Amino acid sequence: MLVFKILFKNLFRHKLRTFLTIIGVAVAVLAFGLLKTIIAAWYYGVQGSAANRLIVRHAVAFIFPLPISYQDKIARVPGVTRVSHATWFQGTYIDMQHFFPRMAVDPKTYFKLYPEFLVSQQEMADFLRERSACIIGAKIAKQYKLKIGDIIPITGDIYPGNWEFTVRGIYYGKYEYTDQTQLLFQWDYLEQQLRQVTPGRAGYIGWYVVWIDNADNAAAISQSIDNLFKNSTAETTTETEKAFQQSFVSLSSAIITAIEVISYLIVGIILLVLGNTMIMTARERMTEFAVLRTLGFGAFKVAGLILGEALVISCLGGAIGLFLTFPIIGAVAASLSNFFPVFKIETSTLLMIISLGIIVGISSSIIPIHRAVTIRIVDALRQIE
């Protein structure tokens, strides 16, 4: 009991120093949690991939289109159960700041390959009935306060012109990581306009989505599909949806690596801040520790005083940082929802932060503990504070 009383007396002997150290740890923990969440958000698209879905794209680059005539040929490949397609449309809604994915899809098959997109039967029927109709994700509907029947005007860039789409459905995600930020409209509508304005661009799609009967045969089926179009004017590359998503993540690998490095540098900063505080504290109290040892306090109790103080400061700062992390991440998620469909702190990050508080507390006390328990009592008593 006496040890705890001394510990808390020492803890607030220099109130300003203790306060600033706790704040420093809290800010560092907050930054660490935010950076780790950003890294995790980059990989949520990979987590949402289905093992039975393959993506067929142009072998040269994703931006090159594929002939619509490929669809029937792909459908006849053994192991393929369904085939659909999508085309990146993009365009501008309001202005360039309001970005979200906009794609032309095969209306009759696309949603069958993405069962995690939940749409009511009535809304799907309305979508199929109207060529200029679209279905939007629930997050987009909420962000822009859109409802069924609203008109969404889009200024085309890849496909020039002024386009208008009528909202006939709002889809929800079956899973937490399901992307709910897309606008999907009928490819037939795009094709009709292209035939009238730029016939040379008609008859092409962006990529095919293929559902296979057995995920274990993905490599063999992918090879069979690519062999169909070998030496053609538009050769293909077929890969699992997970590999396809990872290829996009790899484009930002340098950024992700930099963020990862910074997050661990922050751990070092926390250790330096707290370690410096504990070394200063131990040096100032070296004479007191010598007196305690003279009075019968063993090395274990002296070490406990230093370790306890370091752990209290570290864990308190970590707790404050963790508490602040949730509203900060919520605010960031709201502003980046169109770029990161899922932006939330993961359980693994929470556990890392909790572990970090304990590990940093222990690590920062090692040097002062060693000094306090190994210095000769007579030498410590000679020191003048």
Image (cartoon, grey):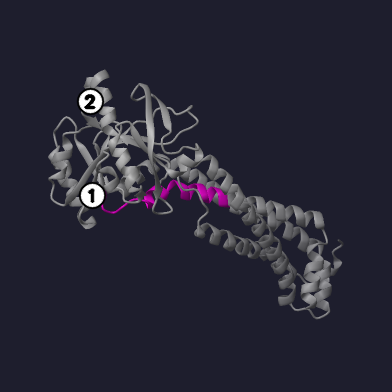
Residue drawn at 42 percent across, 45 percent down? 180
Q: Main secondary structure of the magenta part?
A: helix
Other residues around mark 2 within 10 Å, as few (<14) / some (14–19) / many (≥20): some
Quarter holding residue 63: top left
Q: Is residue 286 visible?
A: no
When the figure is inspected, residue 155 is found, relative to residue 228, above or below; the finding is above
Q: Is residue 141 visible?
A: yes
Image quadrant containing the N terminus? bottom right
Residue tagged 2? 202
276 horizontally vs 380: left or right: left
Q: How many marks?
A: 2
Q: CA distance from mark 2 to mark 1?
A: 25 Å
Instruction: Name the residue nearer the viewer: 189 or 23.
Output: 189
* Element assignment for label 1: strand
Task: Identify residue type, mark 2.
Answer: Ala
Give the residues drawn in magenta, as a range.
33-53
Extreme residue in the top direction: 197
Instruction: Name the residue nearer the viewer: 322 or 147.
Output: 147
97 horizontally vs 274: left or right: left
- Looking at the image, tell me whether mark 2 or mark 1 is earlier in sequence order: 2
x, y percent for residue 131: 29, 32
When the figure is inspected, residue 194 is found, relative to residue 38, above or below; the finding is above
Q: Looking at the rendered structure, which numbered label has been put on residue 256?
A: none
Verify whether residue 34 appears in magenta.
yes
When the figure is inspected, residue 260 is found, relative to residue 149, above or below; the finding is below
Verify whether residue 8 appears in magenta.
no
Residue tagged 1? 211
Residue drawn at 27 percent across, 49 percent down? 53
When the figure is inspected, residue 60 is found, relative to residue 267, above or below; the finding is above
Extreme residue in the bottom direction: 296
Task: Identify residue type, mark 1.
Answer: Trp
x, y percent for residue 67: 19, 32
